[in-house]
Image: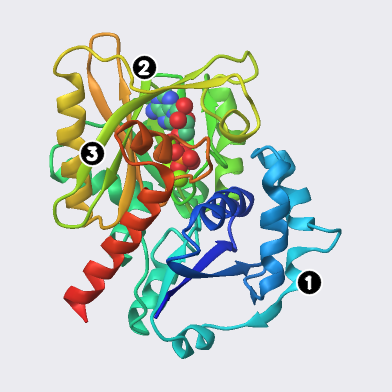
């Protein structure tokens, strides 16, 4: 009996569009001989929508470039919004399907943060990717930094700021931030795709950057900016994680001073160099830190570990993304392809890992 893979995408998240693009690639690449594929779109409002018509915009997306500016067209399909071509449903749907597996291709809050994973967990539905604890801790830049500090993985200095601190004790917070050297990076604690992130070059810009980040979360991290290369590795596995070759991001456009949302999805000037040219010993150290970080968060399935490497080869872990981008031009699948695991096989492997974990805990 074929396994039914229910692919979740969209979601109540500022990374909704990115998720749609990631999921369209996943839905196209999954093996239809091996699996029965069921798309499950989650609207911006959080409504679950199913139905075979959801596959139409995916099929139509063939000719489209996979950039975010095209996402609306993809969602529109034949002039009909994805949300309106399907049928509203709920989690109950999944419990009725035999041999079902959930594949959440969701980025950001309400999808990458352990919430939907917890729902699957309580209903005994196996699911692809990171478990509850890794998802929740990995999504939260404050919690994950504290865990990485505890296991002695080098990171840039930072200050955590709650909205109430910013209201009640602003002078203290500004003083703590002043101990960092400008530029600093202001980030919402729970977000991704660079949404809500600002590079702040002087204290005068701090206020606006904080306000922007607080649009997305009650908690913020202000990080020391580093002048460094951006190097990423992909992690795959449960108890014995494997690490891919390293890739480097080289944003070249004048339009961005760091790896912004636009540079990630809408700007062809950003190049991914795979494998990244690294001095001897640097790659090995990155692999060791990536595994350590993954195990520290109790990672399962997949993650992408983002590092900074300075000119003198100092290595800092920036973050661990438990549901990395999955578009055909995303770093995570490209790293595995270069490591000998092409996109379709990577998806099979992720499903196998989910089954293996479920078999252990069931
Ligand atoms: P994603 O999940 O898509 O990787 P994110 O929203 O979690 O992104 P970060 O990866 O933390 O955000 O930061 C986004 C980008 O901002 C980095 O790729 C880098 O270009 C820049 N950046 C972030 N922090 C720093 C820093 N401390 N020093 C220098 N550049 C930074
Ligand atoms: Mg991230
Ligand atoms: Mg992310
Ligand atoms: Mg990142």
Q: Give the spatial CA distance, label 1 vs label 2.
A: 46 Å
Position of residue 356 measured from the top left corner of the image (x, y, whole percent) = 22, 68
Question: To which residue does mark 2 refer?
Answer: 228
On the question of residue 169 being in view, the answer is no
Circle 3 residues within 10 Å: few <14, some 14–19, many ≥20: many
Task: Decide if ligand 1 comes within 8 Å of the CB at mark 2.
Answer: yes
Position of residue 287 measured from the top left corner of the image (x, y, whole percent) = 19, 33
Against 282, residue 343 (above or below) is below
Question: To which residue does mark 1 refer?
Answer: 84
Marks 1 and 2: which is nearer the front? 1
244 sits left or right of 11 in the view:
left
Proximity of marks 1 and 2: CB atoms separated by less than 8 Å = no
Q: Considering only order in the chain, which callout, 2 or 1, is on the residue closer to the N terminus?
A: 1
Position of residue 54 measured from the top left corner of the image (x, y, whole percent) = 68, 67
Say which mark, if any, is on residue 243: 3
Position of residue 25 measured from the top left corner of the image (x, y, whole percent) = 55, 49
């Amino acid at each position: 009996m074929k396994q039914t893979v229910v692919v979740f995408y969209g979601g109540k998240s500022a990374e909704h569009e990115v998720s749609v693009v990631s999921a369209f690639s996943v839905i196209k690449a999954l093996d239809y001989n091996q699996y029965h594929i069921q798309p499950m779109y989650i609207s911006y409002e959080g409504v679950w929508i199913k139905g075979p018509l959801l596959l139409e915009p995916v099929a139509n997306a063939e000719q489209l470039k996979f950039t975010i500016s095209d996402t609306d067209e993809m969602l529109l399909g034949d002039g009909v919004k994805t949300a309106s071509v399907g049928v509203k449903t709920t989690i109950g749907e999944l419990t009725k399907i035999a041999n079902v597996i959930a594949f959440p291709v969701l980025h950001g809050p309400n999808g990458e943060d352990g919430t939907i994973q917890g729902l699957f967990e309580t209903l005994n539905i196996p699911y692809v990717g990171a478990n509850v604890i890794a998802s929740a801790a990995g999504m939260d830049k404050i919690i994950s930094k504290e865990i990485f500090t505890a296991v002695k993985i080098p990171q840039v200095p930072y200050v955590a700021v709650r909205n109430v601190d910013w209201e009640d004790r602003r002078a203290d917070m500004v003083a703590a931030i002043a101990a960092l050297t400008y530029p600093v990076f202001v980030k919402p604690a729970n977000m991704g795709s660079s949404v809500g992130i600002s590079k702040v070059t002087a204290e005068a810009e701090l206020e606006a950057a904080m306000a922007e980040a607080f649009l997305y979360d009650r908690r913020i991290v202000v990080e020391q900016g580093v002048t460094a290369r951006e190097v990423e590795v992909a992690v795959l596995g449960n108890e014995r994680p494997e690490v891919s070759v390293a890739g480097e991001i080289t944003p070249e456009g004048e339009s961005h001073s760091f790896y912004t949302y636009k540079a990630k999805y809408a700007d062809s000037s950003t190049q991914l160099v795979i494998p990244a040219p690294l001095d001897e010993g640097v790659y090995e150290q990155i692999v060791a830190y990536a595994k350590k970080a993954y195990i520290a968060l109790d990672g399962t399935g997949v993650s992408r570990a983002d590092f900074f490497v300075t000119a003198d080869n100092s290595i800092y872990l920036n973050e661990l993304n438990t549901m990395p981008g999955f578009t055909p031009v995303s770093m995570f699948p490209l790293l595995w392809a270069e490591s000998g695991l092409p996109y379709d096989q990577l998806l099979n492997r992720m499903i196998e890992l989910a089954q293996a974990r479920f078999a252990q805990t069931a």
